[in-house]
Amino acid sequence: MAACTFNIDNNKHVSELQKVTRDDLYGSRRVQALGPDNKPLRRAGVPEEGNLYLVSGDVGRTTRAGVQFTLAPAEVVDSATGQKKELVPSSFKQAPEFRKAAAEEVSMLEVASVYRLPGAQLSQGALYLGTFNYRDGVERNDAAIVTNGHGTFLLVGKIKKPACVGMEIDSQIIAEAAAGEEAGESAENFESLF
Amino acid sequence: MYIKLTNFQKRTAELFLLSLNGSKTSKRVITTANGRVEPESQAIITRIPGGWTADKKPEQIVEALVKSDPEIDTRLIGKPVRIRSLAYLDEQRRPVCHFRLVEEKLTPEGMVKETKPYKVSESNIELPIQLSPKGSQTTEDMVQKFVLHKIFQVVHLDSLSFDFLFKLCEEIRGSGFIRVNGGIKCNEPLTLRREGLPSFAYLRGRIDGDKYCCTLHLTHQELRVPAE
């Protein structure tokens, strides 16, 4: 993976990024359908007409604007104003800035991706906050750099800022909440989660 | 989603888990003759199902390609489709009625470790979830050891649950992250939705005047590198 430069507390650190996933740590699981002869079966989709069995690769996706198909490029605009949004450059092109942060701030980061930074030379226990965008995009992602006994890690996601609630705020908040949301002890066995 | 939370005094209150995902601030648009339109993704058939080369010899394929465009069936290719149901096909692409689902557990190296009949994992938050006296973490330990993949805000539903949560936050505010368990014996990680992954859950509370802020932090990954 390509190397990225990070400005951490006004010091430049260059490191390549090694993605760390749950599957790398604990393994994965998959559900398979077996036929009467115990041979694996192939999953297929049946369209509404019911006359075809479509397997992976039989179907592609195209873009429709109104009733017509189009190859015109889409532009990203602000939902409220309709103004064109500026692209946030990839952090590989523009070195992201990180500042020292407290554990309280880092604990509010909802993490989507974890990368190991083998080239970063930081002291154990150090915590930094900043932003990181793997690719060009329209939204800036928050990120934290955490160093523990296993190495230095870059955690990318979104910082959540829950507000304090008083007695006057009650069911109104709930009504606005999105319908379906996804969903340890220190010595927990994370393998048991499978 | 609604939860029932039992505190250290074994009192239970019904509360609500509020997602902290904000609404999207941007959208994609395409300029057409009728103005700006939000594009929609549409599934179309891009390959003849079953393949037109099936059971043909290479010479027959070459001959067919020279004569016409057999790979482009104008009745099918580019046709919009909407998948309505699911089927399982055998090697000859025939639908199979009698099948069984198995779940395979794979090692990090991709080897099959265990195979067992597939059983849907059910949510375990219909029963009260309970604060555990064991497994609490300081904030520093929490961020150094675990990857927090989801954060919910816990809010009250009525004045009784407001008092319950306010008092709970007052009680735990200096204690970092308090472990929360689910299940009948209250010793299981939380599974918030059907077929969802179980996650270890921690509750954090703080007080600001007559207001409280209670958050539930979920983790299913440690912050470490894979074993060599």
Image: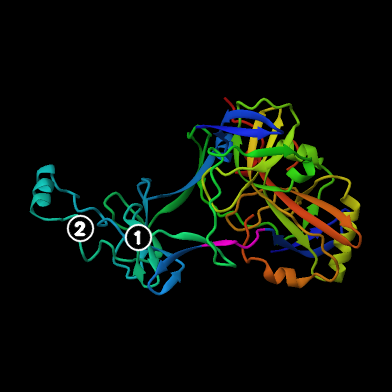
Task: Say if residue B96 shows up in the picture.
Answer: no
Q: Residue furthest bottom?
A: B34
* Foreground residue among A87 and B207: A87
Asked if residue B25 lies in the magenta stretch, the reply is yes
User: What quarter of the picture does the C terminus of chain B occupy?
Assistant: top right
Colouring scheme applied when the structure was drawn: rainbow
* Foreground residue among A93 and B134: A93
**What residue appears at the point 13 percent right and 44 percent down from the top-left corner?**
B57
**What residue appears at the point 61 percent right and 42 percent down from the top-left corner?**
A132
Q: Nearer the viewer, mark 2 or mark 1?
A: 1
Q: Is residue A182 left or right of residue B64?
A: right
Quadrant of the image occupied by residue A131: top right
- The x, y position of residue A5, in whole percent, is 59, 32
Quadrant of the image occupied by residue A81: bottom right
User: What quarter of the picture does the N terminus of chain B occupy?
Assistant: bottom right
- The chain letter under disc 2 is B
Using the numbered discs, state the Cα–Cα distance from disc 2 to disc 1 in whole angstroms.
20 Å
- The x, y position of residue A142, in whole percent, is 65, 46
Which residue position holds label 2?
B72
Quadrant of the image occupied by residue A47: bottom left
- The x, y position of residue A25, in whole percent, is 59, 35
Span colored in magenta = B21-27
* Foreground residue among A50 and B40: B40
Kind of element beneath mark 2: loop
The amino acid beneath tag 2 is: Ile
Q: Is residue B139 left or right of residue B221?
A: right
Asked if residue A37 lies in the magenta stretch, the reply is no
Which residue position holds label 1?
A71
Q: Is residue A49 above or below residue A28?
A: below
Kind of element beneath mark 1: loop
